[in-house]
Amino acid sequence: MLVGILSDTHVYDRAPKLNPKVIETFKKRGVELILHAGDLTSLDVLKELSKVARVVAVQGNMDAYYGTSLPEKEVLTLGRHRVLLIHGRGIYPRGDASKLAYLAKEHGCDVVVTGHTHTPAIVEMGGVMIINPGSPTTPRRSSPSVAIAEFGDALEIEILRV
């Protein structure tokens, strides 16, 4: 299964709209599912993404301020993998791989998709693959980005600049 991954879109609070290259990239790649790791800040993001594929999204630390009510976490089975989708709020220091890996293992997952740092990263820690797509609209120390992951016999992950 080919999955598009993004986080920290911050539409309307920090960005006027979703970066159009996100939709373009996901359509071109033919993603079958989209995971959004929080800080949408507008449900309009879900509407736009759902035109491409089914979307699963979680609540980010900024979402409640803008009236978006989503679950704090989701656990999904994708191929041979169990995936924990969380924003990363409450993980200190931000994006700490050992804490994210521990949290994934607590939920019986071997992959965690997270956001919050606005910085892309793919890290393997203690048997857990950690995927942070960065941000397509408000990146920190990087270019705007999303990730694509192929959940097949092997897990293949790519960070894409948009």
Image (tube, helix red, strand yellow):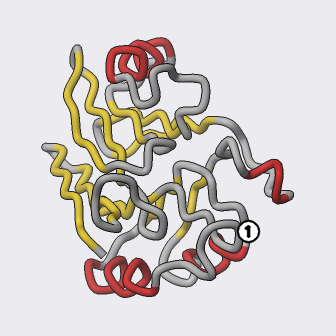
Closer-to-camera residue (149/32): 149
Q: Residue furthest front?
A: 141
Q: Residue at x 29, y 65 (%)?
A: 143
Residue 44 image offset from top left, x and y in percent: 71, 76
Q: What amino acid does circle 1 point to?
A: Leu
Instruction: Kindly identify the residue that appears in the image at 73 percent across and 68 percent down.
Output: 42
In terms of image quadrants, where is residue 97? top left
**Above or below, comparing residue 77 to residue 135 in the picture:** above
**Relative to 33, does residue 122 appear above or below in the rendering?**
above
| Quadrant hosting residue 48 | bottom right
Location of the C terminus by quadrant is bottom left
Neighbor class of circle 1 (other Cα within 10 Å; few <14, some 14-19, many 20+) is: some
Residue drawn at (38%, 23%) of the image:
96
Give percent across and percent down for residue 136: 42, 68
Q: Please state the horizontal and vertical placement of residue 37, each as a whole percent of the image.
A: 53, 49
> Left or right: 129 with respect to 9?
left
Residue corresponding to mark 1: 43
Q: Secondary structure at mark 1?
A: loop
> Is 128 rendered above or below residue 61?
above
Q: Which residue is depicted at the point 36% across and 19% down?
A: 101
Who is closer to the viewer here, 160 or 77?
160
Q: Quadrant of the N terminus?
A: bottom left
Q: Position of residue 92 (x, y in %)?
A: 50, 20
